[in-house]
Structure formats: C-alpha cells, structure tokens
Image (spheres, rainbow, N blue to C red):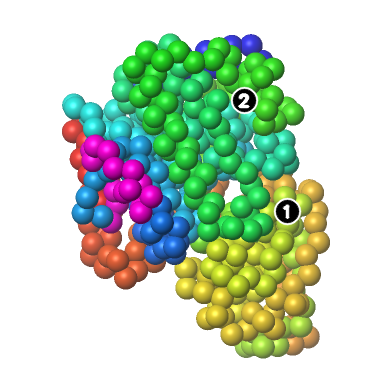
Amino acid sequence: MQDITTRISRFVADLRFEHLDAATVEQVKLFIADYYAACFAGYRINAALNDKGIRRMTDMGGNPRATVLFMDKKMPETNAAFINALFAHGADMDDGNRKAAGHVATHVMPAVFALADTLEGVTWQDVFTAIVAGYDVFNRVVGAAQPSLYAKGFHSTGIGGGIACAAACAKLMGLDADGIYNAISLAAIQSSGLIIIDESGQGCKPINPANGARIGLESAQLAALGVESSRNPLESKKGWFNAFSDTVDEDTLFSGLGETFTINESYLKLYPSCRHTHCGIDAAVDIRRRMDADGVAVEDVEDILVTIYPNAVKSTGHTPYPKTVDEAKFSLHYCLAAALEKGEFGLAELEVSGCRMTDRLVPLVRVVTDPELENRAKGIRGAVVTVTAAGRTYTETVLTPKGEGEKRLSWADLEIKFRQCAEGMADSGQVADIIARIRAIQPSCPYTKLV
C-alpha cells in the first residue's frame, strides 16, 4: 500500500483528452444524458428533501455563479453541486459500478458542471476528461475497498464521492499532480456516509452524494489556493483505506490504470430502485410475460420463491410492506410483487397505493440466499425467481441485470428511459432535443449549459 495517493494523482494529472478513444467519448455522452434523465426523475420523486435542500442552500446566500437545474436562478457553485446531486440520486435511477458498488454520475457530474460554470475558456474536452478521471478515481479507490467497506456499514457513494469529485474538479482547474494530491487529501479527510439509509430514512440517501459533490469541489478550490493537506491520506494507518475497509485490492486500483477507463465498465439503470432488486425485477417481468402468453392470470399466483445473494437481502430485505415511495425503492419483496403484478417496473410502480395486488403477492414472496449468485470477478449479481401459478411453475435466472455487460443500454433505450423520467416536465420532443444536443457535442467547442 505504498504511494497510492501519488500514483492516483499522477494518473489524473497526466490524463489527456487524446487518451480517450471514440468509444469512451461516446460513453461519456451517453452517461451525461443518463445523468440528466436521473435528475428529472429525482426532482419529481423526492420533492420533500429537494425543497428543504433548496431552502437551506438559498438561505446560505453567496455569489450565484452556477446553474441549478429546473430553477431560474443560480447559486454558489458548491451549493449548486449539492442541490443537483440531490436531484440526481433522488429516484435511484442514476448509473453505477458493480465493483465499487456505488454511483458515480450523481456526484461527479454536478461538481464538474457547477465548476465549469465558473471557469473561463473551458471546453467540452476538458469536461469529458475530468469526468473520466472522476469515474476512474471513484471506481478504482472504492472498488479496492469492497466488499469490506459495505460490510462495515458505509455508503460507498458518499464515502468515495468527495475523493472522486476532488480529483475531477482539480483536473478541470488544471492543477498539477501536487495540487491534485492535496485536493484528494482534503476530500479524503472529510469522507462521510452510512448505508443505514437503506433501512430507514431512505429519502435522505441523496445527501451522501450531495456532500461528496460539495466537499470534492471545495477541496479542489482550496488546493488551488495552495492549501496543503495530510500526506498519505489513502494508504496511511490513519488513512482512508484503514478507516473504511479491512482489505485493499491493489489489482482493482492499478490494473489498466491510464489504459482502460472504468466508465466503460459502469452500468445504467432501468428501474427506480436499489440495484440489488434489479435481477429479481427482470426475472419477474419475464415470468409475467410467459404467464400472459399461457393465459395464466396474476390472481392465480400461489408462491414466489426468490433465491438471491446475501448482500441483496442485507440492503433490500428489511421492509416487505413499504408505506412510502422511499421505502418501496429498497424493498425486494415489494419490487418483485409489483413487477409481477404490472409486468413492468417504473416510477409509477413506486406508488404503493397504485398496485392493487401487492398486498396479496408480497406474503407469497419467500427469500433464500445463495452466496454463489454474487461473484465480483465474473460480474455476477444474480437472482433466481420461481413462480407457481395455476398448477404451472415458471423459473427465470438472471445473473446480470439489464444495463450492464452485454445487456448495456443503447441510445434508443436511454431515450425511452428519459421520457419516462421526465414525464410531466418535458414532452417527447423536448427529450429528443436534449439527447440530440448531447450526442452532437463537439469536444473542442466551449462548454455550454445543456438543460
């Protein structure tokens, strides 16, 4: 564990837009579009927290230099980053990374975009490079601390978000390796976020990435002013890894560093719920399709057996009968029952009062665990769902949910998701226009507001 912070800082400092191949640039555009889709959904779904967050940030005042989404006013860049991150994570529709077991766009993009609003001469290639750097720092550092970090009760998106945002923002500001080192260090000593928010108070979960965005941006700005922070903040016995994890996977940290970019290994989500529910939802939707083809009604369901990996139950097995939208996002039982009832799972299915059959279906859900259904090395986080109905048995095995690996989303898939996320806020023509503008970004052109 020697010189981890130095090696990471040098990678960020040395990264150039020219190092990104065409596929990576296209992936960045796709993930930017997905970020905005998630912001629309989070703005709609998590209004209670959003309103209070906006009120608090507004009361703080300050120099209004950065754009806040869906508002006709600006805020200080750290406050704007905080609010936009609240939106991005509010519906749990934001992207993620399997190795890191956390979300990236929800903090890196609000921080980078807010900072870009304040800088002169920033081009899209500067922004793209900073985003790629942020993804790599988050996915590599946090991924190297898993699964121990999660087992200890920490929320990876919050714990690592500040570090990633500090690196990305320092890169956008043009800091050298020493400045990036200090930015990372300043963020590391402020890392925070507990995963208890998947058990109760789920509506507050976006505060963790919002803090990451704010802390990371401010840390980069302090480093730019010459603030020197702790040495060896990641690798010291008093440092980040030792505080948050019992193990450090150096292969995850350094394998392919500077050659392969982890944004290309990250996933997009189709469903507004915790990622641990997605394989089960995929299976339930497929089973409902087969039942419909056989003329078997959902009212005839007699038993629902779900075999899934233990971490999924740890995160989503606490609230079989959710009473709110926030609880529904973290209820494995409810998500499967609703997906089976409706044959789909979107924002509408989070409204627990709108699913008439779930009260009957949820008691039929039996959950058993199988550790073999999770394998980080093989990219497996799967579920086996067996439904008995009208004397028939339907079984579906899903090892990788839609949105990652060979099942990654296309631009057409993303446009459908975006329309669903923006329903009531933007019509299909407006959504198509946003996506077209993102796809048409020329990296050499100046950075401009997209939404």
Magenta residue check for 61: yes
In the rendered image, which residue does mark 1 sit on?
314
Left or right: 433 in relation to 147: left
Relative height, residue 184 to residue 149 (above, below): above
Label 2: few (<14), some or many (≥20) within 10 Å? many
- Label 2 to label 1: alpha-carbon separation: 24 Å
In the rendered image, which residue does mark 2 sit on?
240
Question: Quick one: SS at disc 1?
Answer: helix
Corner quadrant of residue 133: top left
Q: Amino acid at mark 2?
A: Trp
Residue at point 30% right, 33% down?
Answer: 115
The circle on residue 12 is: none
Residue at point 48% right, 23% down?
Answer: 186
Label 1: few (<14), some or many (≥20) within 10 Å? few
Relative height, residue 184 to residue 152 (above, below): above
Can residue 239 be seen here? Answer: yes
**Camera-side residue: 444 or 100?**
100
Corner quadrant of residue 224: top left
Can residue 147 be seen here? Answer: no
- Where in the figure is residue 69, as x and y percent of width and height? 29, 52
Q: Amino acid at mark 1?
A: Lys
- For the magenta stretch, what is the residue range? 54-70
- Where in the figure is residue 430, as x and y percent of width and height? 23, 62
